[in-house]
Image (cartoon, helix red, strand yellow):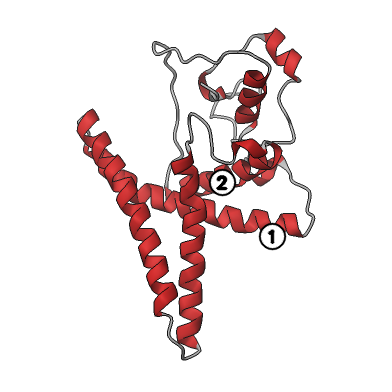
């Protein structure tokens, strides 16, 4: 693998010291950055199938979308540092990376169509572009969701398509905000992509995961 998530991983301390420890200028994607630097230094990242961990997902649609916005924003900070990773890695492959910019194109085309119609002109062409792009993205994710539902025998896989389309919208918004801030010369901050969670009830900040 060329990327492992720090949510369930262990590193050799000597390896971390050699490549320079974690980049505290990054919020989300600091683990991607570490993975890339470790593999570039010749270290091997291995997935152990027997490893288990407990992961708590965000509760509610708004917190999910806020998290996905942070993921999209942080991914741009990561790509700005590692230009060769524009097409993703073993976890987020090029097909997944392509979703967000395509959704941004669809949103821009839809806005253009509305503006043209409001001005009394025909917005059919940009409207068709927007609908076609969203349709292609939806079919792609629907197929993936059906495969997961069949393989895992879990109908929850059918929710993958609408969930992922919402994720694409959040990432598209992140692309727009990130681009505007970069053009204005605003320095990136870790909090732009990831806010620390509140400590769990009954735990001190030091003890909270």
Position above or below: 37 against 87: above
Q: Where is residue 45 in the image (x, y as percent from the top left)?
A: 55, 16
Does residue 200 appear anywhere in the picture? yes
Give me the residue at 40% from left, 13% from top. 49
Q: Whole-percent x and y of residue 60?
A: 42, 46
Mark nearer the N terminus (2 vs 1):
2
Residue lying farthest to the bottom in this orientation: 120
Q: Is residue 153 above or below residue 15?
A: below
Residue 102 rendering spot, x and y as whole percentages: 47, 56
Image point 47% across, 36% down: which residue? Answer: 93
Residue 191 left/right relative to 57: right
Figure check: 136 above or below 18: below
Q: Which of 22 and 209 is in front in this view?
A: 22
Which disc number belongs to residue 196?
none
Q: In the image, what residue occupies the spot 64% across and 57% down?
A: 177
Q: Name the residue under label 2.
A: 72
Residue 204 seen:
no
* Residue at 22% in and 34% down: 154
For residue 1, side relative to residue 49 (left or right): right
Is residue 10 shown above or below 113? above
Marks 2 & 1, CB-CB < 8 Å contact: no
* In-image side of 43 versus 162 (left or right): right
Looking at the rendered structure, the secondary structure element under dot 1 is helix
Quick check: 53 left or right of 69? left
Q: Name the residue under label 1.
A: 180
């Amino acid at each position: 693998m060329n990327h492992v998530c720090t949510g369930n991983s262990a590193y050799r301390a000597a390896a971390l010291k050699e490549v320079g420890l974690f980049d505290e200028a990054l919020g989300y994607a600091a683990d991607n950055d570490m993975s890339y630097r470790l593999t570039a230094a010749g270290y091997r990242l291995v997935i152990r199938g027997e490893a288990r961990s407990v992961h708590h997902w965000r509760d509610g649609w708004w917190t999910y979308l806020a998290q996905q916005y942070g993921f999209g924003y942080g991914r741009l900070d990561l790509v700005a540092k590692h230009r060769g990773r524009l097409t993703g890695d073993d976890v987020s492959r090029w097909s997944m990376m392509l979703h967000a910019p395509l959704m941004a194109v669809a949103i821009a085309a839809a806005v253009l169509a509305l503006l043209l119609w409001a001005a009394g002109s025909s917005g059919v062409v940009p409207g068709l572009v927007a609908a076609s792009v969203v349709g292609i993205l939806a079919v792609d994710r629907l197929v993936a969701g059906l495969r997961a539902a069949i393989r895992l025998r879990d109908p929850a896989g059918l929710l993958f398509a609408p969930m992922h389309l919402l994720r694409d919208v959040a990432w598209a918004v992140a692309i727009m905000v990130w681009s505007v801030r970069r053009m204005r010369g605003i320095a990136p901050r870790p909090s732009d992509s990831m806010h620390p969670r509140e400590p769990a009830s009954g735990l001190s900040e030091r003890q909270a995961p």
